[in-house]
Amino acid sequence: MGLALAAAVPIGAMALLLAASGTAVLSRGWLLPRQRRHVLRPRLFGWAQLVMAGGLGTQLVGLLAVDPVYRPVVAMPGALALLLGLVLVVRAQRPARTAHTG
């Protein structure tokens, strides 16, 4: 359990930071200064952060509370939530500038 607990602390901290940031975006429209230039749809970005926080929370529950035999069953929805959050983050950002040649 020692190694699982050592991994749980940073995972839990990251989940809480993502949840706080997503809540700030949804309630106030507030983004970190580095994100303001890149995010085109702040509300979608906030939801993406909340989905990713939920995925990390699911991973954390699977790491700490589930028997190791059944851990993949709990971890898989968390992994899918992280991927969905990543897709939402990409959709919320501005498209990259492309160089026109010709």
Image (tube, rainbow, N blue to C red):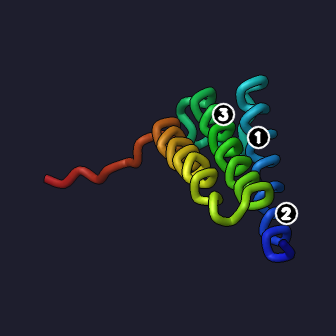
Which label's residue is closer to the chain start, 2 or 1? 2
Q: Quadrant of the N terminus?
A: bottom right
Q: Are marks 2 and 1 in contact (CB under 8 Å)?
A: no
As measured in the structure, the alpha-carbon distance from the residue carrying label 3 to the one carrying label 2 is: 23 Å
Q: What SS does tag 3 mark? A: helix
Looking at the rendered structure, the kind of residue marked 1 is Ala
Q: Is residue 40 above or below residue 95?
A: above
What residue lies at 53% left-to-right and 33% top-to-bottom? Answer: 40
Marked residue nearer the N-terminal end (3 or 2): 2
Question: Residue 27: percent from the left, percent from the top?
Answer: 77, 23
Dot 3 amino acid type: Gly
Where residue 52 appears, x then y in whole percent? 64, 45
Question: Whole-Å distance between the Cαs marked 1 and 3?
Answer: 9 Å
Residue at the left extreme of this rendering:
102
Of tags 1 and 3, which is closer to the observer? 1
Point out which mark residue 19 bears.
1
Q: Is residue 41 left or right of residue 8?
A: left
Secondary structure of residue under mark 1: helix
Q: At 75% from the left edge and 52% from the top edge, which residue is drawn?
A: 61
Q: Residue furthest bottom?
A: 3
> Given the image, on which type of amino acid does mark 2 rest?
Val
Q: Label 3, on which residue?
A: 46
Q: Secondary structure at mark 2?
A: helix
* Residue 25, quarter of picture: top right
Looking at the image, which is closer to me, 43 or 101? 43
- Which residue in the structure is indicated by mark 2? 9
